[in-house]
């Protein structure tokens, strides 16, 4: 179960998206957006089995090697979004299971999670249904872990970096003019910095191509195996976007707001369809055209999330082929 945390330059080879079905132990309420709480609970789970790994993930590594969703209540999406906007605490009910989604971006984290579950299930307390995690004052049991590529929720799966590349190469035989991204949880892009000599805070609330895909290109270069890093040419993508080679063709986006424990956060949710306009530019350092590189990054977003704080429930995103 040990991870050599000195291997910070050795990239993972596989990506995982898991759905954890949880059952509340008692009746009560919980804030509608709990990404911050889930993030803390997940780190506590890892800490109980590998404390040095939890410390490394939290303090010593800025690459964000996992993401967490907020608690997913068994409610219609519209009702949940209304509760998030109004910050109305929602009921948890032992007769109605909830779920959280976790993605693992470092291959070694999956065997760690698997081994920790085996230890948890074999502990004496497991026969008495020991609590799995605690969110705020609410405690949950773990009922099921889903990892199928064909799960009906559409939010689980596993892949490798080479499989992602193969998928866009296989589809490259037919030109794909449109694709859509679904932004399923509050998304925004942190553009804070110094302006006119003064520090300013700004969060962009539109999925403009240069916000989405330059950020994803950076994530690819952080996470991909060394021999695959140069398959994505960030400068080429940036120039292609600046030349309006990739544009927004359609959208169904809505402004949204959630509240963390100590502050509100504004952003957006919904879908956005992008269209390729320019020719399929290439770079001698990559066998992929710029359009294939962008499609590759669109598929990567399923695991890494997009934008600000994907490790705390924001920026949950998935690729939808064609127009929506």
Image (cartoon, rainbow, N blue to C red):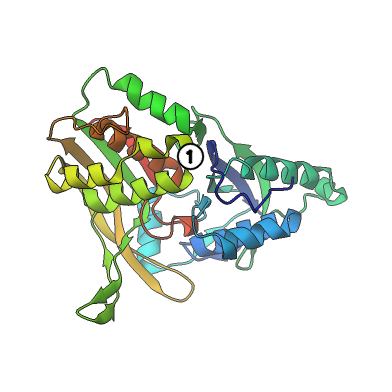
Q: Is residue 319 visible?
A: yes
Camera-nearest residue between 104 and 130: 104
For the point 74% across and 58% down, the residue is 48
Residue closest to the far right: 124
On the rendered structure, is 190 left or right of 104?
A: left
Would you call the spot at circle 1 few (<14 residues within 10 Å), some (14-19), or many (20 or more)? few
Place of residue 49 in the rendered image (x, y in percent of width and height, measured from the top left) = 75, 54
Place of residue 176 in the rendered image (x, y in percent of width and height, measured from the top left) = 22, 26
Q: Quadrant of residue 265?
A: bottom left
Residue that label 1 marks: 226
Does residue 317 lie above or below 283 as drawn? below
On the rendered structure, is 279 left or right of 150?
A: left
Place of residue 56 in the rendered image (x, y in percent of width and height, measured from the top left) = 62, 60
Place of residue 218 in the rendered image (x, y in percent of width and height, measured from the top left) = 37, 50
Residue closest to the far front: 284
Camera-nearest residue between 224 and 89: 224
Please count the marks in the image.
1
Q: Secondary structure at mark 1?
A: helix
The N terminus is located in which quarter?
top right
Q: Is residue 25 visible?
A: no
On the rendered structure, is 76 left or right of 52?
A: left
On the rendered structure, is 178 left or right of 199?
A: left
Does residue 258 lie above or below 12 as drawn? below
Does residue 195 lie above or below 77 as drawn? below
Camera-nearest residue between 108 and 274: 108
The C terminus is located in which quarter?
top left
Residue closest to the far bottom: 198
Camera-nearest residue between 197 and 17: 197
């Amino acid at each position: 179960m040990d991870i050599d945390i000195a291997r910070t330059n050795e990239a993972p080879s596989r990506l995982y998206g898991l759905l954890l079905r949880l059952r509340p132990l008692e009746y009560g309420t919980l804030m509608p957006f709990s990404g911050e709480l889930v993030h803390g609970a997940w780190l506590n789970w890892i800490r109980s089995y590998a404390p040095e790994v939890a410390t490394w993930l939290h303090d010593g590594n800025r690459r964000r090697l996992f993401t967490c969703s907020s608690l997913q209540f068994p409610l219609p999406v519209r009702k949940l979004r209304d509760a998030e906007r109004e910050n109305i605490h929602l009921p948890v009910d032992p007769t109605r299971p909830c779920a959280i989604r976790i993605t693992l971006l470092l291959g070694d984290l999956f065997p760690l999670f698997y081994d920790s579950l085996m230890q948890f299930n074999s502990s004496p307390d497991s026969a008495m249904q020991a609590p799995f995690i605690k969110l705020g004052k609410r405690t949950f049991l773990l009922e099921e872990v889903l990892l199928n590529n064909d799960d009906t929720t559409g939010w689980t799966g596993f892949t490798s970096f080479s499989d992602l590349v193969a998928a866009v190469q296989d589809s490259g035989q037919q030109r794909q003019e449109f694709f859509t991204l679904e932004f399923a949880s509050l998304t925004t892009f942190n553009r804070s910095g110094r302006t006119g000599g003064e520090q300013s805070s700004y969060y962009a609330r539109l999925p403009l191509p240069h916000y989405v895909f330059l950020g994803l290109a950076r994530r690819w270069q952080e996470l991909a195996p060394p021999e695959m890093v140069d398959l994505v040419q960030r400068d080429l993508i940036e120039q292609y976007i600046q030349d309006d080679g990739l544009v927004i063709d359609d959208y169904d986006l809505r402004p949204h707001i959630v509240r963390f424990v100590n502050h509100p956060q504004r952003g957006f949710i919904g879908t956005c369809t992008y269209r390729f306009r320019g020719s399929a530019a290439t770079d001698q350092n990559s066998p992929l055209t710029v359009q294939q590189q962008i499609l590759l990054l669109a598929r990567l977003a399923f695991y890494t999330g997009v934008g600000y704080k994907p490790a705390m429930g924001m920026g949950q995103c998935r690729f939808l082929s064609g127009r929506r």
